Every structure is written in structure tokens, then in C-alpha cells.
Image (spheres, rainbow, N blue to C red):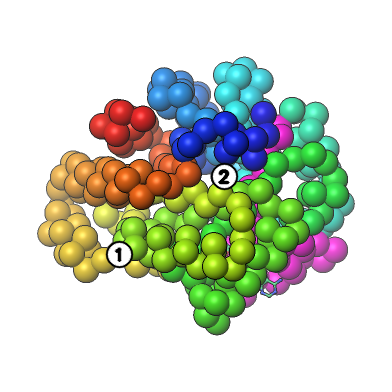
Amino acid sequence: MLIRDLFNQKKRTLSFEVFPPVREGNLESLFATIAELEELKPDFISVTYGAGGGTRDKTIEIASRVKNEIRSEALAHLTCVASSRDDIARILEDMKAQNIENILALRGDPPRGEERFVRPEGGFGFANELVEFIKAHGAFSIGVAGYPEGHPEAPSVEDDLKNLKRKVDAGADFIVTQLFFHNDDFYRFRDRVMAMKIRVPVIPGIFPILNYRQILRITELCGSKIPPALGERLCRLQDKPGEVEKYGIEYAQDQAWDLVRNEVCGLHICTMNRSRAARTIVRELAL
Ligand SMILES: Cc1cc2nc3c(=O)[nH]c(=O)nc-3n(C[C@H](O)[C@H](O)[C@H](O)COP(=O)(O)OP(=O)(O)OC[C@H]3O[C@@H](n4cnc5c(N)ncnc54)[C@H](O)[C@@H]3O)c2cc1C
């Protein structure tokens, strides 16, 4: 099913994000997690696309199993990194052959150790170009990334919003946001999106914190801010991993409650390939 059609049928979607494990043996453990997530009846499961090399083929393999074996809906992420137009065309054909109908179209981050993203030879420099290409090569439903706090490379939030509009004008059907820890950032972003006459659903990305060092690394990379009170609490708990996880899940749960009260059209929960946080959040919300 095309994800764009879901929004006409449902007041609010529920989705989970997983990533392809680096080690081969961990694939079955991921599918055990996906089976647990499926009990929560998500509308779709999204599968990230490796920043480089090895795990890329796995994205299609996992999305295909979600779609064809588990018979749930899959959203396969795809980036412009290290791919020419021909490479992307081949990937799209592969996706069609696997019955994958939904793609999250991304530019991708610069490879490790490089400061700027450089357009790959014969490829795309920005996600809006990828959206346009996908649109011309199949009947996919296309999602794109949005940044409530602005993308770290954008000169201003306004510039970033103009670039978001380019992606939607190129054919994107929905927006999934970067993680954020201050819901007001999301509400302000949603208002600005509406003011720009961007008329597609905006799904907030929720990231339950499970590990102190991991969240420091991730936020440093993606530029999302950790509010001071949250940061201080996590810092105090850092030597008690169980307490960090418990508090991280509680915090995400509070965020999710507030988002639902404020009529978001979906909740997209990053799982880090573990189901516990998602199960707690969804069951408490009685979604
Ligand atoms: C929900 C979500 C899922 C993600 N999944 C993955 C994943 O699976 N794999 C992965 O590697 N990364 C993933 N990322 C990270 C993403 O690849 C990075 O944030 C990347 O730096 C930007 O990707 P983008 O698609 O937003 O790029 P773009 O929309 O191309 O934007 C990149 C920068 O360029 C600017 N810009 C955009 N278009 C133009 C233009 N036409 N002219 C001038 N400037 C422009 C933007 O303002 C922004 O600063 C994800 C991010 C999110 C929010």
C-alpha cells in the first residue's frame, strides 16, 4: 500500500524505524524484534540506508521481507551517497521487483571524515533531485526528511524550509522529522511548514534515549539539541545504564503523549532495533 493513501484513511499513523545490522548473524535477531513490533500493529516499518558500503543491500532485503513475508508495509530509505543516476535507477528497479512501494528519499551525510557532501559523479547533490528522479521512475509514495531545528548545514531555518518545499514540489508525499527533545520545536516547525503552503503530512520522529554515550554521539552528528534539564539528568544517571534507559523511555512517552494531544498525524519511533521502548510507549498511549 502506498503510504500517502494511509493519511486519507487514518487520523494518525504509527511507524517504527529499524536499521540493517552490521553483523550477518544479527539479522534474525532484528526479525525477532520486528515480530514484537508487529504486535503493536504499526502502519509501516522503515528501514534505514547505510551511510556507506556493506549494509546497503540489506535495506532492500529487510524491507522486502517486511513487505512480502510479514505482509506489513515497508518504507525503504534511500540516499544519494556514492551513487550515480544509473545506480539509483537499478536500485529502483530492484525495489519494484521486490514489491516495495514506499521510499524515504534522502541526500545522506558526507562520508566519515569529510566535512561537505560532494555530489557523486553522475549522481544527485540534493534530496529534491532524488525525489524528482524517483517520481519519474515509478509509482512510489515518497517521503522526505524535515528538520524542526533546521538542518545543520542550512544557513537559516528559513532557507532550510525553502529547500523542504523544493522536495515537496518535486513530488514528496509526506515528511518525517529529525529527532527532537523539545516538542515546541516541532510545533513551531509544523506551523512554519503550513505557512509555506507545504500541504503534506508531517510525522514527528521520536527517539527514546536508551544509552547516554549513544545519544551524545547522535545529537552531535544530527545537530538536535538536548534541553539542559534532560542533559543534566542523563549526565547524573550515566553510570546507571538501566536508569538512563528507564528515564529515556519515560521522556519519550511524555513527548508522545503531548504530540498526540496536539493532533499530530503520525508517530514515528526510532527503535535502535529493540522493541521495549516502542512497546512501552504504544501500550501506555493505548494507541
Ligand atoms: C527521518 C530521517 C531519516 C534518515 N535516514 C537516513 C538513512 O537511512 N541513511 C542516511 O545515511 N541518512 C539518513 N538521514 C540523515 C540525512 O541523510 C542527513 O540529515 C543529511 O545530512 C541530509 O539529508 P536530506 O535528505 O535532508 O538532504 P537535503 O534535503 O538535500 O538537504 C541537505 C542540506 O542542503 C540544503 N538544500 C537542500 N536542497 C537544496 C538545494 N536544492 N539547493 C541548495 N541547498 C539545498 C538543505 O537546506 C540542507 O541544509 C535521515 C534523516 C532523517 C531526518
Which of these two is toward me, 58 or 278? 278
Q: Is residue 264 above or below residue 165?
A: above
Q: Is residue 201 magenta?
A: no
Q: Is residue 113 above or below residue 2?
A: below
Could one spot residue 21 in this view of the protein?
A: no
Label 1 CA crowd tier, 10 Å (few <14, some 14–19, many 20+): some
- Quarter containing ligand 1? bottom right
* Quadrant in the picture for residue 232: bottom left
Label 2 sits on residue: 48
Q: Measured from the top left, where is residue 142 in percent x and y?
A: 68, 46
Q: Mark 2: is the Cβ under 8 angstroms from ligand 1?
A: yes
Could one spot residue 286 in this view of the protein?
A: yes
- Is residue 123 rendered to the left or right of residue 15? right
Q: Main secondary structure of the magenta part?
A: loop
Amino acid carrying mark 2 in the image? Thr
Q: Residue at x 60, y 19 (%)?
A: 71
Q: Nearer the viewer, mark 2 or mark 1?
A: 1
Give the position of the N terminus as an image quadrant.
top right
Label 1 sits on residue: 226
Q: Measured from the top left, where is residue 257 in percent x and y?
A: 29, 44
Mark 2 / mark 1, whichever is N-terminal: 2
* Span colored in magenta: 100-129
Q: Measured from the top left, where is residue 160 in percent x and y?
A: 57, 72
Whole-number angstrom distance, CA of label 2 to CA of label 1: 23 Å
